Image: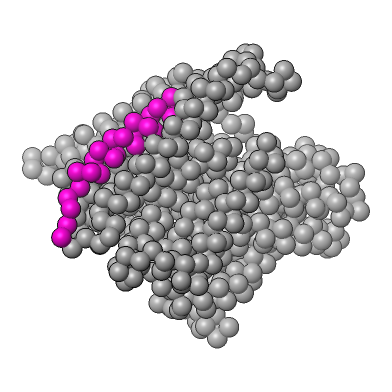
Amino acid sequence: MSTRSVSRADARRELVLGCVTLAIAVGYYLMAIRIQQSDIADVVGAQGLPKTYAALLAMLSIILIARSAAQRGFPAAPDAAPVTAKAHVTRGVAWRVFGMLMNGVIYILVVPWLGYILSIAALIAATVYYQGGGLNRRVAAVAVGGALLLWLLFVRLLHISHPAGIWPSLL
Amino acid sequence: MTEFLAALGSLFTTPIVPAAFGGVAWGILGGALPGISPSITMALLLPFTYGMGPTTAVVLLAATYVGAEYGGSIPAILIGTPGTNAAAATVVDGYMMKQQGKGGEALGISLYSGFVGGLFGLLVLVGLTERLSSVALAFTPSSYFALGVLGLSVIATLSGESLLTGLMAGVLGLMISTVGTDPVTGLNRFTFDSPELLSGIPPLLVMVGVYAVSELFMKTGEPNWEKASREDARIKFPSLPMWKRIALPQAIGSVVGAFEGMMPGAGGAVSSFLAYNEARRWSRHKEEFGHGSPEGIAAPEAANNTVACTALVPMLSLGIPSSNSSAVLLGGFLMHGLIPGPLLFVNHPDVVHGLYTGLFVANVAMLIIGYLIMSPCMWLVSRPKPYLMAFIYALVVSGVYAIQTSLFHVGLALGFGVLGSAMKYFKLPVLPMVLGVVLGFVVESNYRRALVISSGDYRTFIQDPIAAGLLAAALLFTVAAVVRRMREA
């Protein structure tokens, strides 16, 4: 990949970041001005610092957007070191993060029903599979063993209750 | 000194010894896994400390830090991959020694040098923090506000490549800290009528999310790391002639680590490379550096473990974390209702002195466990990465739930994992955001309290000499960082 495109990639990334944070700042400010006013408020009030933070973030975002817009017009220096493959964040990273997140979200949704042991075993198996470990008897054994180990650690040793699921009501 | 001696007595009445040993073992295992930094190793342990006493909890976390700094050198020597950033300098000569068939000797030098550096760092920690804390009694709300601002000014140093993005991350953290109940009026802010958010977002969840969860997310799909053979893993402690040879580099590493550990942003990685360079400068065997020099291992490893103690100096005495790991330890303090800073020594001297004792035991434990744990360590590092990642994910999810038996908290931690991943993608530094979350409440509550006391007169921040001094220091710090960046550019 040419050094010119690396510079533009970073500038594009900063432009996106600036727009996202500017949107966050605007949204946060709009929520801040809706905070109730109190009769016992001090000089600053409950809205004071949130509005300040929003303004700060907006200002910094605008500076970042302006900087990235200016940098997009500049090619990288001719002798700039080429970026290695590791330094590039591939497009697949968003999907990887999404997949791992979904594993966790599904765990949160099913654990009140299936209970802790079954749900955590499923989480382990799903994560192994998602990480490229395949789906076979070995994975199942590791998932069940890991779930039992964690149950022993949290529920038996540390006496921290985890959801039991619908099973007690069926007995 | 009398308090320290009294704290030694607590060894026999509180679980400090098992906490220190357990923390070191966990830290070595975590540090030995490439990509699992000391801060992540500590963050994984945070939820487990919830049901412990405060002294036990902080000793466990601090001992984890000590163990992880050594643990990072194991894969650095055996497979040429540092387990932690701080162990990167150890790869240079450590891996070369392993290839020369001296892997066991290299591990022994690393372990012994870490022990020496850790004890030196502990002496510095004990000597400096008590003195700094004596100023505590004169602190007013204005002073605490200025202290918080000084802590935030550290962002200028911790911002990595770009000061602008570092400041943005810091402000994001401050915004997160406003979620919950207003500290003065008691009004709800940004809670979306959710009862779980009334008490705010615990810094612990932010740290577990942005450090541990995001690392798991981002490592998905990366190739597995190289394996090492068991024969390489037999530790050999240095002989007497070798002890004499590595004494000077250990001293150099310890002194460098002591100074750099207290400097925000420097941390183990910077100090280890600085120590390496200085050791080479003063060595009689300069030509051996880079080709398997034992001094090239002794200096950075002594520096690493010195940093593990001296990084706690600003955190304990001023409440300002100087590194990711001390930020996680700060989270541990907060979780147990302890506010690090000047009044910690007044209100909870037992915790502080228990921590000193625990660190002493942890450094001794590191020698013992470091020798015994090699086989299980090698077994663990050799496991296929998918299994390790899956188990860590399950551990994180279970641990976060255990804090308040809340699935909402688990969802929050996952959300911060996504945020941490996004920050890494956009090259937004994480530590400034964590600083903002941790210090945000201190800054806001004391700022407004000071104005209430002064009836809205902003001159109170300048009329208070301590506050004025700290604000001036914050400004100086920030300007110095900006000037340095401009010169480097």
Q: Position of residue A25 (x, y in %)?
A: 34, 37
**Residue at screen point 19% across, 36% down:** A114
Seen from the viewer's position, the closer of residues A121 and B210 is B210
One can see residue B392 in this view: no
The image quarter in which residue B243 lies: bottom right
The answer to whether any part of residue B137 appears in the image is yes
Of residues B383 and B469, the one nearer the viewer is: B469
Q: Position of residue B259 (x, y in %)?
A: 67, 60
Residue B250 position within the rendered picture, expressed as x and y whole percent measured from the top left: 76, 59
On screen, residue B285 above or below A75: below
Q: Quadrant of the C terminus of chain A?
A: top left
Point 46% across, 57% down: residue: B149
Q: In terms of secondary structure, what is the magenta stretch mainly?
A: helix
Say above or below: B347 vs B488: below
In the shown orientation, is residue B487 left or right of residue B151?
right
- On the rendered image, what quadrant is the N terminus of chain A found in? top right
Q: Point out residue A115 in the picture as x, y percentages from the top left corner.
A: 20, 40
Q: Give the magenta-colored segment's residue range.
A: A16-39
Foreground residue among B339 and B455: B455
Q: Is residue A80 magenta?
A: no
Q: Nearer the viewer, residue B102 or A74?
A: A74
> From the viewer's perspective, is residue A131 above or below residue A54?
above
Q: Residue at x 91, y 53 (%)?
A: B284
Please indicate whether residue B280 sits to the left or right of residue B212 in the image: right
Task: Identify the residue at the far bottom of this view.
Answer: B2
